[in-house]
Image (tube, coloured by chain):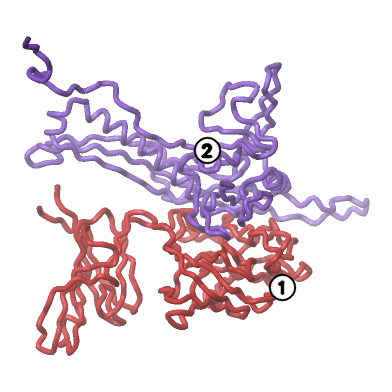
Amino acid sequence: MTITNISNMAPELPLQFSEDLLSTPMFNLIHGFGADEHYADAHMGKTTRMSRYERLDTDGGLLDGSGIDPAAEAISRTDIDAEMEIYAKTVIVNEQVTLFENDKVLTKFTALLGQWLREKEDLLMRDLFASSASYLSATGGINGDNPTEISRNDVDNIERVLLGKDARTMLSNVEAMDKFGTGPVRDGFIALCNTDITPDLQNVSGVLLTNAYPSQKDIRPEEYCSISRFRFFVSSKGIKESSSSLLGANIYKIPMFGMEAVAKIEQNTYSAVMGYRPPHVVSSVAQNSQLYAKFAIARAITNQNWLSGLKVTQRL
Amino acid sequence: MAFSIIDRGTFTSDGTAQKIELPSSADYFVVNNLTQAAKTQTTGRGIKFEWFPELTDGYALRTGKENSANTTEVTTVTSGGFIYRTARPEPEAAVTGTAITAASPAVVSAVGHGYSVGDRVRAYGTTGMLQIAGMDFTVTAVGSADLFTIGYLDASGFAAAATAGTFRRLPEDAEVTPEALYITKITKAASAVVTFSVEHNYQVGQLVTLTVPSEFGMVEMDGLTGKVTAVSSANNTITVDIDSTAFTTFAFPASADAEGNFASAAPAGQRNTYDVDNVPFKSGQFVPYMYLAAGAQSPAGSTSDVIVWEAHKAET
């Protein structure tokens, strides 16, 4: 009996393209949303100055009836400058790609450039946190390294530091509800950390994972948990320093901050520019086209007293 | 494939390695040593060095004058050539040390360290001197292939020398400048003088916020913001307008009491004095760049050599 099967009759087209594209990996963008946003106008120079008037001294001030005026106090103003920087990425596409590819590549490439734009912006803000803040080493853990893994005492110590410098919390509380297994979340400062230490976060005394918040309304997907007065947001690109602990392990820096600690300045009309250059412009024989994305950003620590953080290692 | 020149320049060698920032990625880089090319060489001497993306870090294609007849020969240099960077490099591989003197300045024994003056290194695992474990230092002198000095650390008051230590060379530039830095000394004076462990980039008129953990003694300084009134590059210090005369003396904790915290200073803006070029927060690094090693058989040449360089990019 002769059977017609795929051995003697293979499909004419052995391959088909699934139009349901697989996901492009994208890391959590956590380093920008806690920043104060400022805007810079065009034609006004490259540097943006943000100013803060400092509070007056509260000593003295009692009028003793003598008619002598109290000493006048000079007003003090602190200026924080940030320089605008422009970043760009481009993709050049040959016409044969657009001609022969099954997918609508220009649309996809544009989406990739858009993703690059926001990821790059996030990493630039991360670098600001990494290099321009003071961090304290965690000491309350038990892994025998220095710093240790994160502990409740370490987290509480940073709250003490921030409150002692009059920092304000950024996130409002989540009120308790009559739901089994949930607990109220206090108004909180923001903490940003690497996903490598999520196992250690779960071990901290008093941790409340996001699923145990009384309400899931307005909870960002990047949020991992609440510990004491801090809401922790995680990213695989969180700050990590290779082999820097006493025992040579990786150190993770966790920026922990309150309102108006850092600023992100966007150049008006230049915060996200996407463009396309057609083949007759890019190539003398009109065979290559070009896509590009660019953005302008300036960044600054606006109040070092309202930004602190921890250096930790993994418990492992 | 055709090449377009994307940048060119010239410099007179000071006998040290050079870092040349490039406006875009490069596919070919060439250096000509005009001084040495014009001379008759009695011993082998490189006069032209070329780089291609296919070369390993530290390699270069070298054209040299090999004898007094000026015969040229092309060879491959396997160390002391070019290093092309498109991203901030990770800390280098660890170098094991055997001692750090309890002296001023502290001197490190580490066989075959390979470091140069100006390099920034991170120390950890400093047995017997754990109060500096995790701190970054600038190499201020190189005594031999096995000895280097971390001149901004006065360890003369430490109870003991370190009997071990591990060191990793760090990228020379911070992600963002001005950056937060570790402090090794604060004087008690009408205007306190602050010494940093690595070379600082602070400017007169700038504000810095100081963090001094309790184990460092001078707790009165913790959280204060001062204005930089003087800068000493020779001593790597800044003078701030904070009267520390009555403060507790600044001192490192004993090795056994070290918690991995360090005193630090962080940029906090400026007041009344404006340095728009240097003080604003901005990127501390520029990539891509080409690193040129120095020496008779290296692209950055020897002292007083006039070097011309060109960067090229392949046309698409």
State the residue lying farthest toward the top: A1
> Which residue has dot 2 on it?
A234
Horizontal relation, residue A15 to residue A115: left or right: left
Residue occupied by mark 1: B189
Q: Residue at x 64, y 51 (%)?
A: A138
Q: Nearer the viewer, residue A100 or A82?
A: A100
Closer to viewer: mark 2 or mark 1: 2
**What's under tag 2, amino acid-wise?**
Val
Give the colour chain A carries in the figure.
purple
For the point 23% across and 34% down, the residue is A276
Q: Secondary structure at mark 1?
A: loop
Badges 2 and 1, same chain: no
Q: Residue at x 73, y 67 (%)?
A: B243
Residue B30, quarter of picture: bottom left
State which quadrant residue B290 falls in: bottom left
Question: How far from the left and from the top, in percent, is residue A181?
Answer: 67, 22
**Location of residue B135 in the rendering, given as x and y in whole percent from the top left corner:** 57, 64
Between the C-alphas of marks 2 and 1, the distance is 44 Å
Circle 2 crowding by C-alpha within 10 Å: few under 14, some 14–19, many from 20 = many
In this rendered view, identify the residue nearer to me: B213 or B240: B213
Vertical relation: A242 (above or below) B237: above
Tell me the chain of label 1: B
Q: Dot 1: within a 10 Å radius of its alpha carbon, few (fewer than 14), some, or many (20 or more) residues? A: some
User: Could you tell whether B113 is left or right of B156 in the image?
Assistant: left
Instruction: Check the image and report above or below for A70 versus B309.
Output: above
Colour of chain B, in one word, is: red
What's the chain of the residue with tag 2? A
Q: Residue placed farthest to the front in the image? A: A1
In the picture shown, does residue B249 fall above or below A309? below
